[in-house]
Image: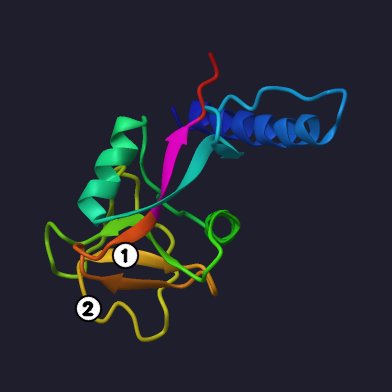
Amino acid sequence: MAFARRVLVLLCVISGLLSRAFSDHPTLKKDNNCPKGWTRLNCNCYIYQDEKRTFADAESVCNIIGGNLVSIHNSVENFFVRELIREGTVEPDTSWIGLHDAISQTGDFIWTDGTIEDFLAFNLDEPDSGGDCVEIVDSDGCWADTACTDMLTYVCIREVQFW
């Protein structure tokens, strides 16, 4: 099982690299297996939503379009999401990501897509019990906890469809 998982991850990485190479070459342009308007990084598709919503509403919209609020698992992905937000907005902005502790409210954060919390990028003074849902700040890519009822833009994630 572990071997199969490693092979799958390796294939996704290779596929992502090839996809990037094909998309940059004018005569080799190839479908990136993401829906129109989505941007691919490795085995996931991402989309920035400029319409401000509460955390729960943003997650619902992401569910409707086939994904979840974005989960971030490394610094490359964090930078990618930050740049996606910066490209989609004129003014500096904060946006929802899928991390929250709204269920336990004990500081044990979880991702809305159920993936493991294996990377954090909170500001030095965060989380500060300012809320149960997490935002990313596009100016520096750092995270902060805030009230889930705040109205923010958001980023959705979904897996690449290979068929």
Write the start and end of the magenta stretch as one range: 154-159
Where residue 127 appears, as percent x and y from the top left, is: 30, 77
Say which of 1 and 101 sits in front.
101
Q: Residue 93, which numbered label?
A: none
Q: Residue furthest bottom?
A: 125
Query: SS for tag 2?
Result: loop
| Figure quadrant of the N terminus | top left
Helix, strand, or loop for circle 1? strand
User: Badge 2: few (under 14), some or many (20 or more) residues near its Cα, within 10 Å?
Assistant: few
Label number found at residue 134? 1
Image coordinates for residue 38, horizontal then vertical, percent: 54, 36
Determine whether label 2 and label 1 are within 8 Å by CB.
no
Looking at the rendered structure, the kind of residue marked 2 is: Gly
Indicate whether 1 appears above or below 70.
above
Position above or below: 85 against 59:
below
Instruction: Give the residue number, with chain letter if any, for mark 2.
Output: 130
Which residue sits at x=63%, y=28%?
11
Q: Is residue 102 left or right of residue 46?
A: left
Q: Name which residue lies at 67% across and 22% down.
A: 31
Which of the two residues, 27 or 89, is positioned nearer the viewer here? 89
